[in-house]
């Protein structure tokens, strides 16, 4: 999986906006990220294609290929994504762009 780049923040912001997610300014950075991940998981169906494209691109495949992976493989990729360097700042930045 490649590292996150600046354009990824804008992609994630569009995904969050499509899901119409709102976040509280009172949350700490850690709370914001955990809340974001939870809300994305709960509302993923609203941006299924965009999420598949994003995670597929990060993993060197198309969104269609990502969507056709066995569930065990896609979960492994999502876990790897959550462990990327700078993931907290990434989600915080993307969440702030949706305001």
Image: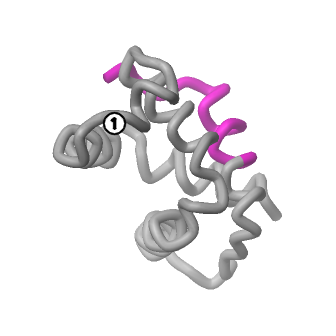
**Camera-side residue of 50 and 35:** 50
- What's the magenta region? 1-14
Residue 56's spot in the image, x, y percent? 45, 27
Q: Is residue 5 above or below residue 15?
A: above
**Circle 1 — which element?**
loop
Asked whether residue 99 is drawn in magenta, I would say: no
Quarter of the rendering containing residue 83? top left
* Farthest-out residue, right: 99
Left or right for 21, reference 39:
right
Residue found at x 45% / y 34%: 55
Question: In the rendered image, which quarter contains the N terminus?
Answer: top left
Residue 94's spot in the image, x, y percent? 65, 50
Residue found at x 34% / y 36%: 85
Left or right for 76, reference 44:
left
- Per the image, the residue denoted by label 1 is 85
Quarter of the rendering containing residue 99? bottom right
Residue found at x 27% / y 38%: 77
Residue found at x 77% / y 53%: 97
Residue 40's spot in the image, x, y percent? 52, 64
Magenta stretch, overall SS: helix
Could you classify mark 1 by the number of other residues whose Cα lies within 10 Å: few (under 14), some (14-19), or many (20 or more)?
few
**Camera-side residue of 37 and 27:** 37
Left or right for 90, reference 69:
right
Quarter of the rendering containing residue 70? top left
Q: Is residue 61 above or below residue 90?
A: above
Asked whether residue 8 is drawn in magenta, I would say: yes
Q: Is residue 85 above or below residue 13?
A: above
Residue 25's spot in the image, x, y percent? 68, 78
Query: In this figure, what is the number of numbered marks?
Result: 1
């Amino acid at each position: 999986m490649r590292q996150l780049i600046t354009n990824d923040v804008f992609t994630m912001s569009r995904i969050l906006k499509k899901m119409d997610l709102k976040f509280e300014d009172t949350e700490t950075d850690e709370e914001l990220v955990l809340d974001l991940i939870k809300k994305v998981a709960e509302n993923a169906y609203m941006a299924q294609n965009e999420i598949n494209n994003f995670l597929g691109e990060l993993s060197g495949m198309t969104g269609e290929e990502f969507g056709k992976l066995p569930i065990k493989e896609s979960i492994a990729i999502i876990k790897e994504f959550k462990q990327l360097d700078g993931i907290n700042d990434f989600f915080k930045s993307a969440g702030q762009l949706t305001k």
